[in-house]
Image: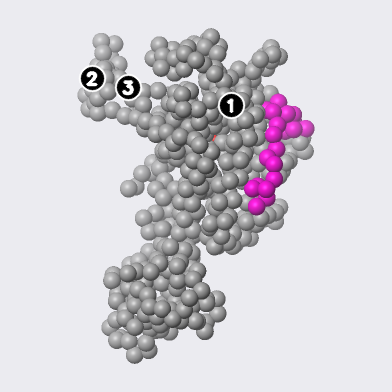
Amino acid sequence: MRTKIKEILTSDQVNYSVIVKGWVRSFRNNQFIAINDGSCMDSVQAVIDLDTDEQLIRKIGNGAAVSVEGTVIPSQGKGQKVEIKVTKLEVLGECPGDEYPLQLKNRPSLEFLREKAHLRFRTNTFGAVFRVRHSLAFAIHEFFQKRGFVYMHTPIITASDAEGAGEMFRVSTLPFDNPPRNEDGSVNFEEDFFGKSTNLTVSGQLEAELAAMALGEVYTFGPTFRAENSNTARHLAEFWMVEPEVAFNTLKENMDLAEDFIKYVIRFALEHNRADLEFLATRLIDEEKQKPQQERSEMGLIEKLEFVANNDFERITYTEAISILLQSPHYKKKKFEYEVSWGIDMQSEHERYLVEKHFKKPVIVTNYPKSIKAFYMRQDDNCEAGKETVAAMDILAPGIGEIVGGSQREERLDKLEQRMKEMHIPTEEMYWYLDTRRFGTAPHAGFGLGFERLVLFVTGMTNIRDVIPFPRTPKNAEF
Ligand code: 4AD
Ligand code: MG
């Protein structure tokens, strides 16, 4: 039976036999093979006999797959407690050094590795990132399940545009070259697979609301798709979203839930992925050294995560946020590229000023202008004319910007219907959504957390393409 390297390195035992299989990370002095099997950050050192067959030795290059049998013994070398004294070595798959892309460079850049995305799992950085991603996914389920939420699978193919933003990928089986057409020349989707126009979901929220209005507390965690043509380090065309939806919750309770949730999953990673995070922290220090002094972050990665997990998030209204921006030295020195005034959709430079320069901690911004938010958000009562707001909340994180978007939902049928009409959202087609307001409506609230933005935050990586195994961005869907 194969033993995982993590087990060997975390055990206090010695003098037992093991079989280890993995890939060669380095081979020194024709004797010391560092083997990694992906179970943890570290490699185990396997020591082979000096009189090992030369033919076999020539096959042990970086990246080769090997199987070793031997005894775990205390190690003389520094930096490792144990090593394996090999009694049997087998090279399962050679890795020709002159052709292997990861061999070509000493420390390949992230850009280089993005071009070799199929191989990047083999590096320490990506190994750490994807183990952390995995842990966070587990922690998300654990958090909600401990609180009695029901995990709800919402559809990936849908006929609705939940956000009303129109950034959807169409799903169709109609022929591209000559689709059936209506008399006016438009494509006749009645002849399409579903008998209507359908798309990949941008959010599971509307369906989650249906479930929450009966099951009470639900959450979704699945892929979502947006055809926004923004080639930024924060946007993907395919990303994973976590969307809790809770009957009877108000905006305040929604904020409390989101804050508890983020702190919980960060603590989980700190506890379960210490070695990975420590490795990523040193990687980050190296990266920070390339930046000018004033742009370097004041805290190390672990310190930042501990700070966020143990301190209250700041909570301010949108109106307060705008006035902070208007009074900032940054504004007075005309350092913002985009204008600042009540009613703007804050740009990431504004959000980052609030979290990184002003508060230096995560900030929850609430009560945004109604005009820049989705139709389903609850309209605030008693607003000043021209300054109508909704019970929205965005959570802004240092280094990331928006990580969560959510709101209390409009539960009043008349207000919801009127808003949908104003925004040209077809009320007849969305009868199923409006029925929740017709039959036993109740206050409720929820939010969406962009999973990759959370992984970015926890790993300290700077480009969202580096925290999802197979990034989908404009002009990029390699495999
Ligand atoms: O703010 P958004 O658009 O909110 C919704 O979709 C709501 N229906 C959620 C809800 O209330 N149930 O998206 C939620 C989060 C954002 O805060 C961001 O973290 C992430 O999803 N996100 C993206 N992440 C990566 N790439 C993109 N293109 C993203 N668009 C949104
Ligand atoms: Mg948003």
In the rendered image, residue 220 lying in the magenta stretch gets the answer no
Disc 2 target residue: 191
Q: CA distance from mark 2 to mark 3?
A: 10 Å
Q: Is residue 176 left or right of residue 132?
A: left
Inspect the image, locate mark 3, and give the three-letter code of the amino acid beneath it. Answer: Ser
Question: Which residue is found at the position 27% from the left and 19% from the top?
Answer: 195
Q: Secondary structure at mark 2?
A: helix
Q: Position of residue 419 (x, y in %)?
A: 53, 13
Magenta region, main secondary structure: helix
Q: Position of residue 468 (x, y in %)?
A: 44, 48
Question: Which residue is found at the position 30% from the left and 86% from the top?
Answer: 54
Q: Is residue 2 above or below residue 269?
A: below
Q: Residues within 10 Å of mark 3 (few under 14, many from 20)?
A: some
User: Which of 462 and 176 lies nearest the eye of the viewer?
Assistant: 462
Q: Is residue 152 above or below residue 118?
A: above
Inspect the image, locate mark 1, and give the three-letter code of the amino acid beneath it. Answer: Asn
Q: Residues within 10 Å of mark 1 (few under 14, many from 20)?
A: many
Disc 1 target residue: 249
Q: Is mark 2 in CB contact (under 8 Å) with mark 3?
A: no
User: Which of 95 and 230 lies nearest the eye of the viewer?
Assistant: 95
Q: Is residue 146 above or below residue 1?
A: above
Q: Secondary structure at mark 1?
A: loop
On whether ligand 1 comes within 8 Å of the CB at mark 1, the answer is: no
Disc 3 target residue: 197
Residue segment shown in magenta: 306-327
Question: Which residue is found at the position 49% from the left and 40% from the top?
Answer: 145
Q: Residues within 10 Å of mark 2 (few under 14, many from 20)?
A: some
Inspect the image, locate mark 2, and give the three-letter code of the amino acid beneath it. Answer: Glu
